[in-house]
Image: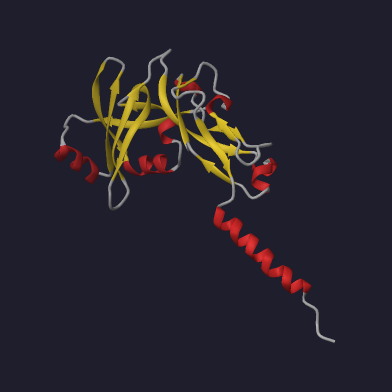
Amino acid sequence: MTAVKQIEASARTQVGKGAARAVRRQGQTPAVIYGAGEAPQAIALNANQTRLMIYGGHFLTTLFEISVDGKKERVIPRDYQLDPVKDFPIHVDFLRVAAGQTIKVMVPVHVVGQDACPGLKNGGTLQIIEHAVEIDVAPENIPEALDISVAGLDIGASVHADAIKLPEGATLTIGTDATLVTIVPPMAAEVDETAEATEEAEPAAEAKPKE
């Protein structure tokens, strides 16, 4: 389950593109906190720390407690923008999280059990249909990933959303019959190449030297 991380921020009195550029020149990242029926609050974060948090993974499924000039807000990131050339963060949106609230988040799907999958051992290929699924969950129960197993599956078999073990109180926002992964047969070209190689090898094996 997701852990609550602590970060420091400062309030911004000026908003707009010009003000945001000025914040970035000071080594900070402009951001905003919104939601929970309160007015949006413009803040500034340490740019280096923000970059590390984003590239550290699971940023959009991590709960943060932001201290803004001494006042603490529990939030979750909802979006961020990166500079298209230098890839550093230029803005972050945070959603306030109230007690008892559930939120919708995209959670990565991790496939396990490949070593025990007959379909893969017999030449099949793992085809991932959904790399992440959306769930409605209490913020404190957000998982880092959802595991689905392909152990025991043969070629042509699939795993559907109803096979996911969800955190307590969480629900899927997609149908439980949605296909997540499937074991597809070998490509026709691969089958043909294998057959041709076998056919070419057989005459060579039958050939005998002249006496």
Quadrant in the rendering for residue 66: top left
Q: Residue at point 40% right, 33% down?
A: 60
In the image, taking residue 152 as reference, residue 36 lies left or right, namely left
Q: For residue 104, which quarter of the picture?
A: top left
Q: In the visual, does 20 lie left or right of 188?
A: left
Q: Which residue is depicted at the point 28% across and 44% down?
A: 27
How many dots with numbers?
0
Tell me residue 127's x, y (percent).
Answer: 53, 43
Q: Is residue 30 left or right of residue 184?
A: left
210 shown above or below 202 = below
The residue lying toward the viewer, choosing from 120 and 198, is 198
Residue most extreme to the top: 100
Q: Quadrant of the C terminus?
A: bottom right
Image coordinates for residue 39, horizontal then vertical, percent:
23, 19
Q: Nearer the viewer, residue 144 or 68?
A: 144
Residue 5 x/y as whole percent: 45, 30
Q: Residue furthest bottom?
A: 211
Please tell me which residue lies in front, 145 or 32.
145
The quarter of the picture where residue 114 lies is: top right
Q: Is residue 187 above or below residue 75?
A: below
The reply to whether residue 62 is visible in this rendering is: no
Residue 82 appears in the figure: yes
Above/below status of 86 relative to 45: below
Residue at the spot x=19%, y=43% of the render? Answer: 21
